[in-house]
Each structure stands twice: as C-alpha cells, then as structure tokens.
Amino acid sequence: MTIEVRAPASSANLGPGFDCVGISFALYTTVRVKVQDALEIVPIGPDLQDTPRDESNIVYQAMLALSEAAGQQLPPVRLEIESGIPLARGLGSSAAALVAGMVAANELLDRPLDTQSLFDLASRLEGHPDNAGASLVGGAVVATFDGQGAKYLQFQLPENLRALLVVPQYALETSKARGILPDTYSRTDMVFQLSHAALLAAGLASGNLAVFKEAMRDRLHQPYRAALVPGLLELLEGAPEHGALGAALSGAGPSVLCFYEANSDVSALKAFLTGVLEQHGVTALLEELPLDNAGVQVSLHPEN
Ligand code: HSE
C-alpha cells in the first residue's frame, strides 16, 4: 500500500494579513509513503537534489512530529518527494512539505489527529498559520495563533478571482525577510493595518472583489521588505492602475501576487510588470496560477 499526499502552494499575508491570512494555489508538493524495512528518502527532480536524504529531511521531520503528537511510533518507510513549487520564493514550499509529511503520517497511523489538531501542529511547526493553514485546508484562511493552537475560518475563494504571480529568479530566505522588520510600530500604522486586514478578511469572506485594491495595502512588512525586493513598491502601486484588483508581496517574497477578475484582459498588466522588472534588472516568470479550494488531498494505492 502506498499513501500519496498532495499539498498545495500558498501565498501568505495578501498585504496586511501578516502571519494570519493565506490562500492556496494549484501547484503541488507530492509525497508517496510506503512501509518497508529501513528508512529511505527519495527526492525526485532537479530542484530537490539538495534535499537531505536522512532524518533531517523536513517532510520526514513533519512525519515524526505527527507521530509524536499522536503518541505513536512511526514505522520505517520509503518516502518519495516531488515538488512543483519553487523554493524560497514566498510560495509556501516549506509549508506544503510539512503539511504533506504530517498528513501522510496521519494516514499511516490511521488518522489519530483531526483537522483542527493538524492545523495546530502545522502552525507550530511553521511558526505561523498562514501558509500551512492554507496548504492544509485550501481556499482562503484567516487565523489567529497563540503559539500552541489556532482559531481559523476557511472560505472558498470567489469563483471569478484569478491570480497572476511574478516569480523572480532569485531566492529570498524567510529569516532574512523577517529580520529586516522593525520591533515597534506607531499607533497610526497599527490602526491603518487593523482596518486594512479587517477589510481584507471581509472582502475574502463576502467575495466582494471591489475592496481588494484598498484592502491589500500594508504598512507592517512590505515597505521594509522593499529593500530586499527590487521594484516592489512600484509593482504594488502600479498593478491596480493596470488592471489588477490588488497586489501584494507573496508571503516573505520575493514573488508578487496580483489578483485580477476572470475574463479581464491582463495584457496591460503583464506589460507593466515586465517593464518594471526590466528597469530593475530582475529576471522573473509571470505565471497565471489557478487557485486551489480543496487543500491537501490523500489517495491510497493498494497495489503498490
Ligand atoms: N507570514 C510570513 C512572513 C510568511 O511574511 O514572514 C512567510 O513564511
């Protein structure tokens, strides 16, 4: 029996929802797990060639964390890992890896953890619930997290919402993008942030796309991270003027997420984005990525 688990990519923050809002994309990390006599970790594909093949592997660590939380012993397994999610681009590759590992171990151990417990564990492993939560349950997630447990609501993403991602060729480590943030903020900035995050959550929950342009403005992280992401502020300011519903740094970056409405013409938006990237000497892919409303998926293959 092989257990196959597919966990989607995600975009955290959507501007003001720092560490508490995420959405998921139809781009996946897939793991296949089968019990055998000794541990064997098999990363597949050129992007994963530097992935550890021993117990330090992040997917395997997530499997161990799950078995520990369940109070059960993990049997030795063959673990195959395949990923279509670019690493260190702000697209939730590490969250997808740990969600896939946790859910595979949960299946292997006959599902000792329910979805809420999986959400809590994923948030603890990742440190915040935005990417991991979206990867686990799909759609849009709004969550609080106290370091142990999360309270969250999941919404299906509006049917007419589409995403265009700017995915630069260079990587940006999350730790570096977090290290650049200040420790304190003014009350004015806090009020700005709260009001925009609240409007963003209301826009996602109601499916009212008209508020996104204003709702995705942020003063907590994007202005500071702009020092690490050439052209960021121009991209964010200009995208809504060229047909985007709104734009935000995707997670800790360096990718940039632009929302647009289904059936709208994105050629002016693409030309604008390409122009700004060229001015800043940044090589990047522009990708129209379908959104994911399903979250992690499990399939069982008894014949293997
Ligand atoms: N909310 C996180 C951040 C996402 O922006 O740093 C990256 O893991």
Image: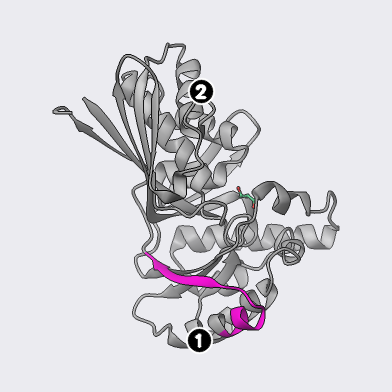
Q: Estimate the x, y position of residue 123 in percent, counting from the top left.
A: 56, 36
Q: Estimate the x, y position of residue 164 in percent, counting from the top left.
A: 46, 70
Compute the Cα span from label 2 to label 1. Answer: 45 Å
Segment tinted magenta in the rendering: 275-289
Residue depicted at x 64% and y 77%: 281
Tell me, yes or no, whether the highlighted magenta stretch contains residue 191.
no
In the depicted view, which residue is nearer to us: 189 or 251?
251
Give the SS element for disc 1.
helix
Q: Estimate the x, y position of residue 66 in percent, counting from the top left.
A: 46, 23
Quarter of the picture holding the C terminus: top left
Q: Is residue 295 left or right of residue 175?
A: left
Residue depicted at x 76% and y 60%: 191
Above/below status of 13 relative to 262: above
| Mark sitting on residue 65 | 2
Quarter of the picture holding the N terminus: top left
Specify few, some or many for label 2: CA neighbours under 10 Å numbering under 14, 14-19, or 20 or more.
many
Q: Estimate the x, y position of residue 192 in percent, counting from the top left.
A: 74, 64
| Residue type beneath disc 1 | Ala
- Disc 1: which residue: 271
Kindly tell me whether residue 119 is visible in this rendering: no
Residue depicted at x 38% and y 47%: 45
> How many numbered badges does the structure rendering display?
2
